[in-house]
Image (cartoon, rainbow, N blue to C red):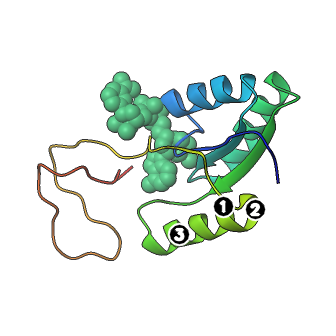
Amino acid sequence: MTTAPVVLITGSTDGIGRAAAGLFAGRGASVLVHGKDPDKGARVFEDLRSRSPRAELDLVTADLRDPAAIEGLADQVRDRHGHLDVLVNNVGVFQQRQALTRRSSRPRSRSTRSLPTG
Ligand SMILES: NC(=O)c1ccc[n+]([C@@H]2O[C@H](COP(=O)([O-])OP(=O)(O)OC[C@H]3O[C@@H](n4cnc5c(N)ncnc54)[C@H](OP(=O)(O)O)[C@@H]3O)[C@@H](O)[C@H]2O)c1
């Protein structure tokens, strides 16, 4: 366990989330790097580690279209860190077209915040 704030940034293997992970790591947070692709996650994790060698980093992988994977992610966070101080819900897009989770059969409302389909 760490005394640094524990930060989970969903979708931190690319784009805005990756940049945020670098900023949090550079400011001494314990950062959980998250993506859906384990190989890409490992590459990004090593890159962040090389840029912030003293940062506490962890890598978690879960496809957030899969409710079971979300539960697994929560279990990993609880088992490995005990708690979260900051959750940056970066994965999730506002889409005009309808999207389904893998388990659901009903289309989501167009006005709700949907999970990514990519
Ligand atoms: N970029 C913009 O101009 C902009 C503008 C407005 C809002 N946003 C919002 O900001 C957020 C980030 O955008 P971005 O442009 O930085 O995205 P991005 O560069 O495409 O990065 C997406 C991140 O989300 C992860 N991801 C995608 N689908 C996932 C899934 N099903 N399960 C788990 N992780 C998943 C990706 O993981 P992998 O690397 O493993 O694929 C990656 O880490 C999004 O919600 C987007 O809608 C972006």
Q: Is residue 73 above or below residue 95?
A: below
Asked if ligand 1 lies within 8 A of label 3, the reply is yes
**How far is mark 1 from mark 2, CA to CA?**
5 Å
Q: Tell me the tag on residue 80.
A: 2
Circle 3 packing at 10 Å, graded few (<14), some (14-19), many (20+), is: some
Q: Dot 2: what SS?
A: helix
State yes or no: discs 1 and 2 in contact (Cβ < 8 Å). yes
Q: For the N terminus, which image quadrant?
A: bottom right
* Residue sitting nearer the eye, 91 or 84: 84
**78 to the left or right of 51:** left
38 or 31, nearer to the observer: 31
Secondary structure under badge 1? helix
Distance between the Cα atoms at labels 2 and 3?
16 Å
Q: Looking at the rendered structure, which numbered label has been put on residue 77?
A: 1
> Badge 2: few (under 14), some or many (20 or more) residues near its Cα, within 10 Å?
few
Q: Is mark 2 within 8 Å of ligand 1?
A: no
Residue for badge 3: 69
Place residue 72 in its image quadrant. bottom right
Whole-angstrom CA distance, mark 1 to mark 3, is 12 Å
Kindly tell me whether mark 1's CB lies below 8 Å from ligand 1.
Answer: no
